[in-house]
Image (cartoon, rainbow, N blue to C red):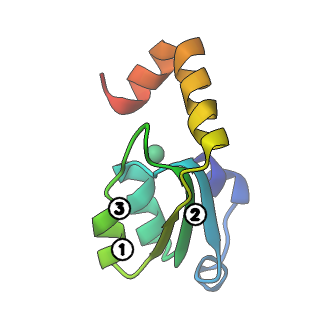
Amino acid sequence: MNCLENAGRLTAKIYSRCTLYSTLSPCPMCSGAALLYKIPRIVAGENVTFQGPEAYVRAQGVKLEILNDPACIQLMQDFIAARPELWNEDIGV
Ligand SMILES: [Zn+2]
C-alpha cells in the first residue's frame, strides 16, 4: 500500500505494465489493491512467514512469483523479533 501511495497518481495504462515487488507474500488488502490497479505481475520475496491469498490472485490472471529468498525470510524474522507489536497489528493479532 505504501508503494502504491508513494508512486502517486498514475494512469491505468502505467499500472497495467508494472511489476509489484514485495518482501512478503501480499496480504489480502495489498493483493486486492494490486488487483484493482490491474497490476499484472507480483514478485514476493517469501511466503514462509505469511501467505496471502496467492491462489486467488493467480486465478485473477496475475503472474505471482514467490522467491522464498533466505534474505527476505531473515529480514521478516528480524523485523518480527524487533517489533512484535507492529507485526501483530499488521496481521490482526
Ligand atoms: Zn498488505
| Amino acid identity at mark 3 | Glu
Q: Residue at x 38, y 82 (%)?
A: 61
Name of the residue lying farthest toward the bottom: 13
Cα distance between the residues tagged 2 and 1: 12 Å
Q: Residue at x 67, y 72 (%)?
A: 10
Image coords of residue 11 (percent x, y): 64, 78
Q: Secondary structure at mark 2?
A: strand
Mark identifier at residue 54:
3
Mark identifier at residue 58:
1
Q: On the rendered image, what quadrant is the C terminus found in?
A: top left
Cα distance between the residues tagged 3 and 1: 6 Å
User: Of marks 2 and 1, which one's residue comes earlier in the chain?
Assistant: 2
Q: Is residue 53 above or below residue 89?
A: below
Whether label 3 touches label 1, CB < 8 Å: yes
Circle 3 crowding by C-alpha within 10 Å: few under 14, some 14–19, many from 20: some
| Amino acid identity at mark 2 | Val
Instruction: Give the residue pinned by disc 2.
Output: 43
| Amino acid identity at mark 1 | Arg
Circle 1 crowding by C-alpha within 10 Å: few under 14, some 14–19, many from 20: some
Image coords of residue 4 (percent x, y): 61, 57
